[in-house]
């Protein structure tokens, strides 16, 4: 798939990949050998019938391919952009054993984009009265887990209401991923599709304040909690409270939700210095670094305590960051931040690291090199080392069992310690991938349907 040049794309927030042309998509789709036992499907958390949609695409049946995807995935344009296919469906592709796997993610993106541009969204027919008797379902959070759960239940005939705490829908898709990687219009249109299935969305509804979980259970047959991981993590080192030190969560939220990239058209500037240091090695760190470049920073570096090989970010995102001029200071651990006379961060004090034996994650453990301290001049620091689950609902729901780190404890069916209350996505896993959250939403929807169906027998 073609991409815009690094020199061009760092000047704006437009998308970097250009997508396939119809001819390119058909050519790539014809590479699929239509395995009898398609392992790619087993590698997909939402069980998209991959060979089936690719076959339709290869035949030029773009609308039919879109419908085939949407049988199990209500957010294909999102997944085609941010899902780590190289670790899931494409990793299982048999062609990848000796060569390049079929570009499943890019084909999914093409199909979704083609449908958006060529097929008018049609609302679903009214839910039959016989199905309405099944009951109403409440979904807390309109991120990928909540949208998927709501869409699946709506297709089964339930009346579903989503309660979203923000003024816009999409959750982390809207506030956590930059415009150049996932355009807001894409998220908005994917949400509109879910709403077209009959799902009601109520914004500015902070569950835990406006309603408690117990109060929702009085009105709804079941509740799915997908309120995400909105609590940023910090390292607990000196100077993290200085001016100019952001959490990545706050930083990306300001840029995405307040349209900071459109200043001065939008009067919501984000103060960014000439020299920016981003702490972390995941996708959020890459996003923060690349956003900083687009906001005018002249020098942007990643501070990561392991090597590039151990970085959890997607390979393509690391590659794009390198192309755009992001400097990678690997085996580097910040231990303190120091201020200038005005109280703004001016230096990041760091230690050099070396890799020891593997830790519980399977990656080699970083070990400090004694007396290796050095100082790095900075104007802005963005801490991107992860998020914890949003604590409000657990705090307001004492009977909801949680892990010590805050995650809601659930069964394999996503059932919490409270009968009728299910949970999935980041509030269960901590910060995870969009597609894993969607998988949780599907599992919960199936479990809710089975439970309510058995009660009506």
Image: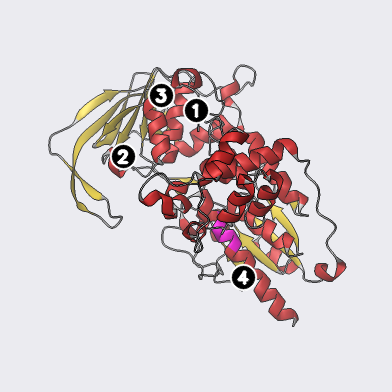
Looking at this view, is 26 or 235 the one in front? 26
Are there few (<14), some (14-19), or many (20+) residues within 10 Å of tag 1?
A: few
Could you tell which of marks 1 and 4 lies nearer the N-terminus? Answer: 1
In the image, the segment drawn in magenta is 438-442
Residue at the spot 19% in from the left edge and 39% down from the top edge: 353
Are there few (<14), some (14-19), or many (20+) residues within 10 Å of tag 4?
A: some
As helix, strand or loop, the secondary structure at mark 3 comes to loop
Residue 202 appears in the figure? no
Instruction: State the separation of the CA atoms marked 2 and 4.
Output: 43 Å
Q: Which disc is residue 324 wearing?
A: 3
Contact check, label 1 and label 2, Cβ < 8 Å: no
Above or below: residue 438 compared with residue 24: below
Instruction: State the separation of the CA atoms marked 1 and 3.
Output: 12 Å
Tell me the quarter of the picture where residue 454 sits.
Answer: bottom right
Q: Which disc is residue 3 wearing?
A: 1
As helix, strand or loop, the secondary structure at mark 1 comes to loop
Q: Which disc is residue 138 wearing?
A: none
Residue position marked by numbered label 2 in the rendering? 237
Contact check, label 2 and label 4, Cβ < 8 Å: no
């Amino acid at each position: 798939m073609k991409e815009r040049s690094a020199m061009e794309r760092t000047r704006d927030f437009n998308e970097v990949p250009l997508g396939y042309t119809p001819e390119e998509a058909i050519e790539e789709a014809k590479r699929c050998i239509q395995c009898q036992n398609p392992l790619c499907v087993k590698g997909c958390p939402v069980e998209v019938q991959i060979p089936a949609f690719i076959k339709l695409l290869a035949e030029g049946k773009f609308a039919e391919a879109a419908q085939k995807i949407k049988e199990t995935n209500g957010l294909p344009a999102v997944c085609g952009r941010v899902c780590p296919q190289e670790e899931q469906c494409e990793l299982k592709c048999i062609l990848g054993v000796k060569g390049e796997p079929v570009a499943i993610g890019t084909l999914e993106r093409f199909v979704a984009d083609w449908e958006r541009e060529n097929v008018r969204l049609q609302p679903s027919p009214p839910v039959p009265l016989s199905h309405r008797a099944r009951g109403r379902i409440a979904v807390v959070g309109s991120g990928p887990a909540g949208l998927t759960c709501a869409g699946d239940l709506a297709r089964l005939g339930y009346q579903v209401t989503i309660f979203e705490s923000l003024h816009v829908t999409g959750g982390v898709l809207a506030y956590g991923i930059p415009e150049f990687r996932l355009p807001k219009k894409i998220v908005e249109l994917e949400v509109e599709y879910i709403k077209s299935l009959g799902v009601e969305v109520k914004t500015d509804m902070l569950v835990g304040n406006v309603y408690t979980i117990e109060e929702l259970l009085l009105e709804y047959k079941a509740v799915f909690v997908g309120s995400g991981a909105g609590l940023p993590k910090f390292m607990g080192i000196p100077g993290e409270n200085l001016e100019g030190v952001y959490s990545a969560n706050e930083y990306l939220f300001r840029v995405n939700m307040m349209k900071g990239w459109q200043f001065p058209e939008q009067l919501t500037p984000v103060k960014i210095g000439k020299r920016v240091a981003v702490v972390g090695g995941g996708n959020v760190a890459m996003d923060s670094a690349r956003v900083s470049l687009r906001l005018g920073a002249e020098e942007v570096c990643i501070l990561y305590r392991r090597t590039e090989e151990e970085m959890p970010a997607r390979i393509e995102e690391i590659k794009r960051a390198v192309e755009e001029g992001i400097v990678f200071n690997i085996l580097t651990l910040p231990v303190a931040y120091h201020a200038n006379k005005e109280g703004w961060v001016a230096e990041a004090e760091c230690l050099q690291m070396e890799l020891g034996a593997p830790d519980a994650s399977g990656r080699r453990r970083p070990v400090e090199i004694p007396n290796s301290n050095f100082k790095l001049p900075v104007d802005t620091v963005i801490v991107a080392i992860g998020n914890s689950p949003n604590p409000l609902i657990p705090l307001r729901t004492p009977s909801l069992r949680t892990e010590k780190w805050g995650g809601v404890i659930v069964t394999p069916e996503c059932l919490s310690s409270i009968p009728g209350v299910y949970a999935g996505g980041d509030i269960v896993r901590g910060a995870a991938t969009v597609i894993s959250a969607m998988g949780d939403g599907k599992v919960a929807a199936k479990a809710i349907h089975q439970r309510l169906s058995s009660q009506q027998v």
